[in-house]
Image: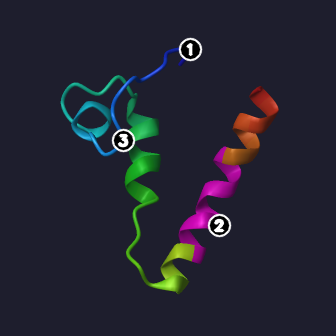
Amino acid sequence: MEEHVDVPFGVWTKIEGNRSKLDGKQLFLLESWDCDRNSNEIIKTLRRRIPEFLRLNKYL
């Protein structure tokens, strides 16, 4: 993406809203990583993030 998204913490309208600079795949990942406070759901969500973390680590 090569672009910094400069928004205050918690202002998701610029990240996930109509003004988002993210592409469809990135928006899908954000949506799929949503979880509640249930510890099992949090662990499942963290596991779903591993492939993207590894991809970014390799890229950087």
Mark sitting earlier along the chain (2/3): 3
Q: Amino acid at mark 1?
A: Glu
Q: Residue at x 38, y 34 (%)?
A: 24
Q: Residues within 10 Å of mark 1 (few under 14, many from 20)?
A: few
CB of mark 3 within 8 Å of CB of mark 1?
no
Q: Position of residue 45 (x, y in %)?
A: 54, 67
Quadrant in which residue 13 is drawn? top left
Q: Residue at x 81, y 33 (%)?
A: 58
Q: Residues within 10 Å of mark 3 (few under 14, many from 20)?
A: few
Q: Main secondary structure of the magenta part?
A: helix
Q: Residue at x 41, y 79 (%)?
A: 37
Q: Amino acid at mark 3?
A: Phe
Q: Is residue 48 left or right of residue 35?
A: right
Q: Position of residue 11 (x, y in %)?
A: 27, 39
Mark sitting earlier along the chain (3/1): 1
Q: Which mark is residue 2?
A: 1
Quadrant in which residue 21 is drawn? top left
Outermost residue toward the front in this view? 8
Q: Position of residue 50 (x, y in %)?
A: 69, 56
Report which residue position mark 3 lands on. Answer: 9
Mark sitting earlier along the chain (1/2): 1
CB of mark 1 within 8 Å of CB of mark 2?
no
CA distance for labels 2 and 3: 24 Å
Relative to 1, is 38 above or below? below
Relative to 34, is 38 above or below? below
Write down the region rendered in magenta. Answer: 43-52
Report which residue position mark 2 lands on. Answer: 47
